[in-house]
Image (spheres, rainbow, N blue to C red):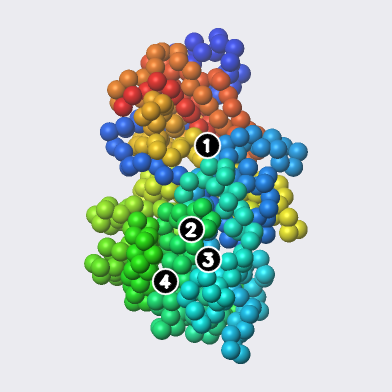
Amino acid sequence: MIRRRQILRSLLAAPVGAAVLAATEGTASADTWTTLNPATSWGTWEGWGTSLCWWAKAFGDRSDLADLFFTRGTVAYQGQSLPGLGLNIVRYNAGATDTTPIGGETMQRSPNVGDARLIEGYWHNWYSADPSSDSWNWYADTNQRNMMWAARDRGVNQFELFSNSPMWWMCNNHNPSGADDGGDNLQSWNHQQHAVYLATIARYAHDHWGIDFCSVEPFNEPDGTWWKSTGTQEGCHFEVATQVPVINYLRAELNSRDLGWMPVAASDCNTYDAALNTWNGFDATTRGNVGRINVHGYQGTGGRRDLLYDAAAAAGKKIWNSEYGEDDGSGLTLATNLNLDLRWLHPSAWVYWQAVDGGGWGLVQETGGQPGPVNTKYFVLAQYTRHIRPGMLLIDGGNGNTVAAYDPGARKLVIVATNYGTGQWIDFDLSRFGAIPADGAAVDRWCTNTGGGDLYAYHQDTALHGTRFWSWFAPNTVQTFEVNGVSL
């Protein structure tokens, strides 16, 4: 520690950050070091996103929300100037609800589901699969579709179509919230019809909406037994044996509509372990028809992310964490699980569930049925989304609390690091890179203190010293650093 204390004493003479350095010099025993390793890369980053679904149904006409989530500009929102998140992925939900009777049969609605969580479907009835017939209503679900267009117009470049439930009339009990017992609810004679429904929407979006879906996901947490007729949203359980024909039908239906280039994603399981078990349950043909593995992040700090990654890598498949959410509005839980994902799961994209939601669930908190204040987790997510951009390489940050990405074109290194309950200095060693800037070169820094203080605040107080730089981290803090002029 002798060399470090000498460096600190020399820095105390500098005006920038002097008070902080003086106050914390005595904490050297708590210092953490990490050496970044550019020789280990986990592929090219595709981006960040959110599912539209419920919040877009409610607020699909809100341009301020579209600006917040889908640009990187400075956005005026409720008297604040906020940094846009720059999300470039949206997941569009194909609805399952329609209150129009069919031959005396009607949709059965859960007594516990609110209107906001029922998404209008496009296929009115089973009389015709022709999308130009009156069996289809392409004016349904206006708000969610409007927000998808608003996202596209702001630069979103990847769209995924996904389903929470088949259309109600395809379900055994005609209830799009699930079976009475939480089991399979898609009628066996409608396995192909569910695929027809999704493939028809994908083709119609291409022809009429100016949207090409980058993938189609026919399930949402099919492993869950909580999708019941008394549920609070649309949902449907699918045994692995039921997923198999749906996946294979969907591949064929997309092919028949000249959408052979559009991948099928599966299976959006609730946990990493369930995703691995589901994948292992598929036969070779079904695996071949899955273009990408989707998984949700609700196992939190548990589960074997590494084993799912190994299975995907062996099959030559990419992984998306296609849904993540929890009710910790501080964002510290988000940072913890996101760091675990990038360290062990190695997804090429990461998608938050509902950008606007009640309590701590939302990035923007829904209050009284309207968008309300921004939760601190919004600023935590900005530490990642505004800096780790599509096309960058994800590289080894050296430890589980440090995420690193490299932009080959700009020769820019991005580091996002999280510190928890003890304030400390964290040192970043860049000695393994091919070239770095000269001693004294500036390192840009952004900071969010989840317990109060900085909220994505920019600081110009950090510089390289040889091959290293360091920064003081208060407890429960996320910081982002950018170093320009770096080569691998």
Q: Secondary structure at mark 3?
A: strand
Answer yes or no: is residue 322 visible.
Answer: no
Q: Secondary structure at mark 2?
A: helix
Q: Position of residue 136 (x, y in %)?
A: 55, 73
Nearer-N-terminus badge (1/3): 3
339 vs 93, left or right, is: left
**In front: mark 4 or mark 2?**
2
Q: Secondary structure at mark 1?
A: loop
Q: Position of residue 469 (x, y in %)?
A: 44, 22
Residue with the mark numbered 1: 386
| Three-letter amino acid code at the position of disc 4 | Ala
Answer yes or no: is residue 69 visible.
Answer: yes
354 vs 390, left or right, is: right
| Three-letter amino acid code at the position of disc 1 | Arg
**In front: mark 1 or mark 4?**
4
Q: Are marks 4 and 2 in contact (CB under 8 Å)?
A: no
Nearer-N-terminus badge (2/1): 2
Residue with the mark numbered 3: 94
Q: Is residue 311 above or below residue 244?
A: above
| Three-letter amino acid code at the position of disc 3 | Ala
Along the line of sight, which residue is nearer the eye, 352 or 54? Answer: 54
Residue with the mark numbered 4: 195
**Residue 207 shows which numbered tag?**
2
Q: Give the CA distance from mark 4 to mark 3.
A: 12 Å
**In front: mark 2 or mark 1?**
2
So how many labels did they put on this image? Answer: 4
| Three-letter amino acid code at the position of disc 2 | Asp
